Image (cartoon, coloured by chain):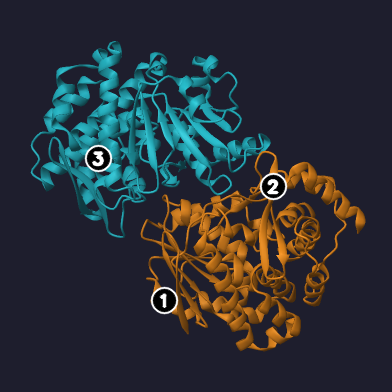
Chain colours: A orange, B cyan
């Protein structure tokens, strides 16, 4: 086990890498803890939850909505959870997003921690304090920014992770490499998914590297005034098509990253689109999509990164160096139409 | 107009006393503002809302629930409100509580301000950053603590305030006097409600005094570790009976203050219960209630101030000096039963 502390503005967050789930009972009083997990994680790891008060929600992105929050709050009341209670999200990004949001609003905020169980949650979703739910097709329209007390990394959860979820997580890993770490990008090019699936040590190291990339970016800019915006690479078009087309988050942002690379060619003279497409393809991610440009643009207009007339778009100067540029909405609409037509 | 700034931990909040509603257009860009008000305030002051994007909700405590939050968020999406939008709650405590909560979670938080239109909202609800909604009979079970940018006090709104709402607000004014300001308590004893209703200057001064009492307490203890707990005087039993019996907030906490005075006799040797009852009665507030002690205690067990086995209860050492004591739940149950039986 390896403990690392990242100091965010309001709180120091403890990361326990290479840990075991059982560490939880040393971090919190079992009587004060309420675990939130989904049916899939619970079914695959039932024994781990023995003796813990646990609220189970349905699995899947469609669960990430207000009705689920209402249901969890009802159950917390029944469990007589109080201000001293600690909520622990055990699951993928949907579970950690919902658990963090519930903990931020229940009784005006209680403490919380996460045990991320998917690659995506380990390297991305559980880090940085952003939480929330979708409203219809609009992703993360409602939520807060609030840091957990701790993150417990137990890679044994990955043994039961479906292939599609591995791929999903690698989309964010490739994103991190693209905006911040050319060396990591080159490492990923050298290996392939099966290498990390078979080699627990390589995977642990990859998780630590990626958790550090994201944590450092967030630490410098917790409330997304600048640097943190880079993490939205691929997410603007990605979010616009994710819920409209029922794509997995990884697939959606993979397509979004390609769109951002093509935009970059125009705005930053970026010349490595083919290399990004190559890496995404190598890890089983899609880079083309038949999507309705008009419909996607309607959703995109509600993007949280939008001002009245322009949208802050994350582009690449080169692999390993992301940059944010404000792009006028009318210009963006034209570009998106042309990208879709071109493919 | 008199501007005063109270510096809270995360934000300096500007209070504009003796101001006019029209000041709003100097504080925010009309295009970026979305006003939230209730049907009563809108009907009584329709002209004021001319040219402002306005979301109207039903009036009354029953509106303070998740369904209303959902409805407001849908409307914000239709209005294309974005991260630069400023939400302004124009109304009583229900409106400011909901508007503050929505602003804290919409797109993970946008800026907001208040124009309190009731006595209660002016002296209490709009101050201090606590917001939220009820969940069934449980008051403020969900919410956040987040400060507004500004408060605009326009006492012309009070001209259309129903008598019952005046009385409601004076319950909180008497609370402030009881826990913090014996001089104010004596002033209130000398006057009566009609004096403040007829005399705009006296009322303005009373509002400033009370806004300052609450703001100072909150400033010292924004996240309710100590001092701020005093503001819960009368609210423990008050909240327990408010929604169960459909009482107004003022009436409920008036009964709660009397209960707290009687408890104080036992725990702090308090001897001025009769004086508190006298003042509450003078301002039209009830001090007795036929309530079901068992049912009230069930709700009280879920109070946010509760730990596992005891409840932090606000008592009085003397008029003008509140104090917090942890009272064991079993002892509290007995006392509540005995108070109810005694009356």
Task: Place residue B319 in its image quadrant.
Answer: top left
Q: Is residue B311 visible?
A: yes
The image's mark for residue A25 is 1
Question: Which is nearer the eye, A4 or A168?
Answer: A4
> Do the dots labelled 3 and 1 sit on one chain?
no
* Alpha carbons under labels 2 and 1: distance apart: 45 Å
The image's mark for residue A100 is none
Disc 1 on helix, strand or loop? helix
Is the residue under label 1 in contact with that under label 3 (CB below 8 Å)? no
Q: Chain of mark 1?
A: A
Left or right: A240 in relation to A132:
right
Quadrant where the C terminus of chain B sits is top left
Left or right: B117 in relation to A284:
left
Q: Chain of mark 2?
A: A
Where residue A343 appears, as percent x and y from the top left, is 91, 59
Q: Residue at x 21, y 54 (%)?
A: B326
Task: Tell me if residue A320 comes above or below residue A343 in the rendering.
Answer: below
* Alpha carbons under labels 3 and 1: distance apart: 37 Å
The image's mark for residue A311 is 2
């Amino acid at each position: 086990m390896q403990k690392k502390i990242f100091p965010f503005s309001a709180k120091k967050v403890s990361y326990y890498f290479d840990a075991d789930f059982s560490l939880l009972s040393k971090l919190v009083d079992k009587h004060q803890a309420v675990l939130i997990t989904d049916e899939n994680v619970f079914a695959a790891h039932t024994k781990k939850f023995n003796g813990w008060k646990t609220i189970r929600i349905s699995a899947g992105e469609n669960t990430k909505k207000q009705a689920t929050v209402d249901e969890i709050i009802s159950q917390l009341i029944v469990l007589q959870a109080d201000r001293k209670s600690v909520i622990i999200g055990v699951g993928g990004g949907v579970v950690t997003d919902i658990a963090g949001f519930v903990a931020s609003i229940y009784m005006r905020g209680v403490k919380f921690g996460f045990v991320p169980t998917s690659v995506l949650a380990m390297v991305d979703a559980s880090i940085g304090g952003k939480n929330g739910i979708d409203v219809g097709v609009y992703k993360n329209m409602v939520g807060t920014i609030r840091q957990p007390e701790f993150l417990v990394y137990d890679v044994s959860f990955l043994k039961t992770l479906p292939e599609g979820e591995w791929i999903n997580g690698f989309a964010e890993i490739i994103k991190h490499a693209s905006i911040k770490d050319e060396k990591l990008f080159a490492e990923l090019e050298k290996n392939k998914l099966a290498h990390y699936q078979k080699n627990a040590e390589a995977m642990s190291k990859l998780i630590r590297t990626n958790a550090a990339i994201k944590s450092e970016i967030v630490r410098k800019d917790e409330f997304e005034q600048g640097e943190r915006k880079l993490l939205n690479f691929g997410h603007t078009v990605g979010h616009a098509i994710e819920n409209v087309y029922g794509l997995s988050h990884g697939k959606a942002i993979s397509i979004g990253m390609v769109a951002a690379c093509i935009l970059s060619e125009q705005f930053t003279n970026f010349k490595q689109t083919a290399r990004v497409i190559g890496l995404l393809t190598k890890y089983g991610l899609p880079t083309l999509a038949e999507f309705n440009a008009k419909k996607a643009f309607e959703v995109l207009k509600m993007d949280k990164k939008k001002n009245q007339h322009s949208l802050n778009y994350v582009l690449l100067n080169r692999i390993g160096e992301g940059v944010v540029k404000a792009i006028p909405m009318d210009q963006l609409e034209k570009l998106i139409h042309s990208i879709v037509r071109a493919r």
